[in-house]
Amino acid sequence: MGKGGVRVSLEFTDELPLARLAGQPEQVLGKGAMNETLHFCSPAHGGWGVIRVACMLPETQLLFVCPEACGRHGAIASIEQGYRSKITYLCIDEHEIILGGYDAEIERAVDDIMVKVKPRPKAILLFLPCIDDLLAGDHSAAIKKMEEKHCLPIRLTRMNPIMLDNKMTPMLRVQRALYEFLPKYPADKKDQGIIVLGSFSPPTQASELAALMRRLGFGPLRHPAFCSSFEEFTALSQSAAAIVLRPEGGAAADFLGSERGIPAIHAPVAFDTPAIIERYQHIIDFLSALPGAHKTRVSAQEIFADAIDAAAAKLEQAAAFLKGASVAVDSTVTASPFSLALALVRGGIRVSRVYANYLGAHEKAAFKELADLDGSIIAANPNHGKKYGTRPEHPLADIAIGFEAGYATAAPVTVPLAFDEGRYGFEGFIAVIDAIVEAVNENREARQNLREQIKSYGLVV
């Protein structure tokens, strides 16, 4: 709304310079821009979908209920990425969809899973498509009946693309569904473990983040990817707290706090030094207030003094090495592309474009600072319909960080990073810098085709 309550008409479009977006980022970054057009998925789009996230749970089976066409993408991706044996598909037809009564079919499918899947699953995650939302399906009675019959937990989640701009997106919903399998532990049975939420491939036990946990009297880091059995996963309930490293873990954090007595802190990944220090200080303050914490009067600034210097030195070397080459960043690389762009610009690296679908709350400060530093940087929405069939003949950047940026800019060098995999804090930023330099060096020796990079990573469109 403008002055006097007059509604301001926004120019929803696919890309604009940051200087023009500073006051109204939703013109490009948000559901307003997306609702004005068809949703475009580039050939570089893929990776950590809801099914792949759910497949992290050990000794579980996914039952995907959908029309045949809805399951095709997930089935191909499961073959490509090596988890096909964890998924069962129940294809429903028009008759069942129109009547809306396929609980009996689901029950028969679960019966088949219990007989045919070896070893017998310890739990089942039931996926339902957007059709079920439109039909307002209620499967609680059927789920309770199946749980009692087969003596195992069954949880429901949804593969629902029509909810992408809703408060409970499919990715938020599926991550919450995973943690709904956890039992509730009494407070006196808790240990000092810390659950990592939202991150698909978490930081390791040897990481900078894990070292900070140990210094404060906590650990180990816990995540489904570290669990080899369903019992190991349910033991996550003993954890003292949880840390949200990516926004996708937000709903799971709310559930753990309200239903399982596990408090959570939001400390999303960042790359510019002030933001990293702020995140770490937030974590220190949060954990120091928990029972059994090692009290410390040392600030994050002091704890990470060496890491700050190492990141600054690495960035300076990279800027000299790149010699003014332009860089494009995309949001498939990280949940914080504007923070990454800001860190690069502050270090003397020229960023020309940032590709993102929306501006998360944790990114607003970085977005504003980046716009103030260089308003000529283009913010672009890679899923806007205007991007369809418009891959440039001449590169829009010299280096693309991420496959989406690689496709959208036709950059001669694509840095094959994705989804914050294991990267957090200063060591995460240093890993990105190293990957940029490595990709440029490899390109000088033997130019790697973007299609080959995408295939080797396992992306499927």
Image (spheres, rainbow, N blue to C red):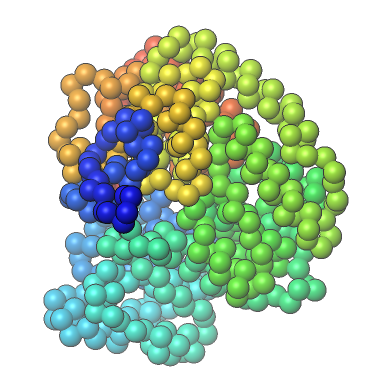
- Left/right of residue 340 with respect to residue 223 in the rendered view: left
Q: Percent position (x, y) of residue 370?
A: 46, 30
Q: Residue at x 69, y 49 (%)?
A: 283
Q: Is residue 306 left or right of residue 91?
A: right
Q: Position of residue 317 (x, y in %)?
A: 57, 13
Towards the viewer: 297 or 51:
297
Please tell me in which quadrant of the rendered image residue 452 appears. top left
Residue furthest front in the image: 4
Task: Please report the residue visible at 22 percent of the width from the left and 83 percent of the height from the top.
Answer: 100
Which residue shows up at 45% across the image and 37% down it?
367
Tell me residue 23's x, y (percent). 37, 40
Q: Is residue 153 above or below residue 394?
A: below
- Using the image, determine if residue 9 lies above or below residue 195: above
Which of 16/195 is in front? 16
Residue at image point 40% right, 45% down:
359
Residue 343 visible: yes
Closest to the observer, 199 or 153: 199
Residue 429 at what x, y percent from top left?
57, 31
Q: Is residue 303 left or right of residue 196?
A: right
Residue 435 seen in the current view: no
